[in-house]
Amino acid sequence: MKRSLKIATLSTLVLAAATAAYAQMKPEDAIRARQSIMRVVALNFGPVAAMAQDKMPFNKDAFVANATRLESVWAMDASRFFGAGTDKPVSGSKIAGFTDATPAVWSDPAKFKAAFDENTSAIGKLAAAARSGDEAAMKAAAGNVGKACKGCHDDFRVK
Amino acid sequence: MARSAPLTQAVPAWDLFLRIFHWTLASLMVASVTTGLLGGNLMKWHMWSGYGILGLLAFRLAWGFVGGPTARFAAFLRGPGAVWAHLQDLLRRRPSFHLGHNPLGGWMVVLMLLAVLFQAATGLFSNDDIATEGPLYQYISKELSDRLTGLHKLNVKLLYGLVGLHVAAIAFYFFARGENLVGPMIHGRKSLPPEPEPEKDPQ
């Protein structure tokens, strides 16, 4: 009885520590994580935007594949990786030697969350339009994703 | 009837191509700012607008050498003495007349053209980290492109200031000096000022 209580307590502590460790991912890894997600987001959105703006011939299959993948990758939620201590590049780090996040991400988290969620909604609508198969709706929805990306970048990304 | 002639006489001031250049540039600048601020699929038109502006600037450069009399750089780029004299005219509320740009306005034109050129040129190398890249982005590093994009965004503020000053100066000439500068840029003619000392009628 005593022994099993000890084990239970210990396992709970280990689990809690592990959860905390995940929540407090090393800044180096967090910066790497969010930049990696955003990079793959851009890789999937690029062809979609190019087709929406007639810079590239419209190919429904390619459009749908990219828009669907974009929704999945976006669901990884890069906004989780802007924790405390990740506002500056990690000096000497090969994988997190820079960050383009503005201080506003940490000083105005509510606004950051709203701008981020705006794109979640726009990407959801893009994926829905892709499923509908209506070319005009797909292109218009892609434009709105571009606007939502810009809406967040304008305040929360340095350039 | 010696006095039947009107006191003022309209003479050609701005040639047709210069006027088309002016209003097309103004329109494309509005289009560029609008599409740039809104983003999304409008970025396609942002780029076309930029190419249009570059074409207009190339025309304006050439027109500064072979265009109408008031369009030529040699005619309106004056030394500091002339600029100072014009400033004195303004400060002392003395009337002045310039068929084309006045000595101060001439330099303002150069400043505006250079700022617009800088804007269009940096745009060629810019990227927005979303889905738009200038046509020359691929020839430079991402880091340099990011820096030029930053300047592209910063220079817009300078352009707002210069355009604001341009419009304010036009309002100043209209309200404080009674000279309408907008009309001549539309129809091309300016009214010569009345003779300083009209001859008296023989009694």
Image (spheres, helix red, strand yellow):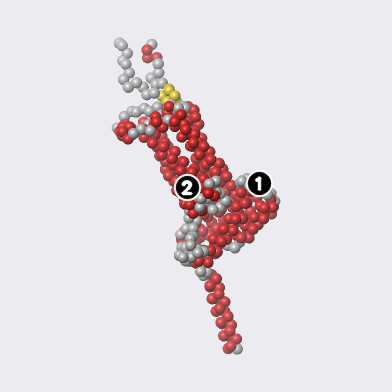
State left or right for residue B7 relative to residue A158: left
> For the point 55% across and 64% down, which residue is it?
A33
Please report, as a chain letter, where disc 2 is located: B
Q: Which secondary structure lies at badge 2?
A: helix
Q: Name the residue that disc number 2 marks.
A: B152
Tag 1 near tag 2, CB within 8 Å: no
**Looking at the image, residue A24 lies above or below residue B37:** below
> For the point 54% across and 62% down, which residue is it?
A34
Q: How packed is label 2: few (under 14 Cα within 10 Å), some, or many (20 or more)? A: many
Q: Where is residue B7 in the image (x, y as percent from the top left)?
A: 38, 19
Quick one: B64 or B39, which is closer to the camera?
Answer: B64
Q: Position of residue B146 (x, y in %)?
A: 49, 52
Please report, as a chain letter, where disc 1 is located: A
Tell me the quarter of the image containing the N terminus of chain A: bottom right
Q: How packed is label 1: few (under 14 Cα within 10 Å), some, or many (20 or more)? A: few
Quick one: B25 or B187, which is closer to the camera?
Answer: B25
Q: What is the spatial separation of the Cα atoms under label 1 and label 2, in whole angstroms?
A: 29 Å
**Can residue A89 be seen by looking at this rendering?**
yes
> For the point 67% across and 53% down, which residue is it?
A62
| Res B4 quadrant in image | top left
Circle 2: residue type: His
**Looking at the image, residue B16 lies above or below residue B54:** above
**Tag of residue A57:** 1
Q: Position of residue A29 (x, y in %)?
A: 53, 66
Circle 1: residue type: Pro
What residue occupies the far front of the structure in this picture? B139
Q: Where is residue B26 in the image (x, y as percent from the top left)?
A: 49, 37
State left or right for residue B131 relative to residue B58: right
**Can residue B22 be seen by looking at this rendering?**
no
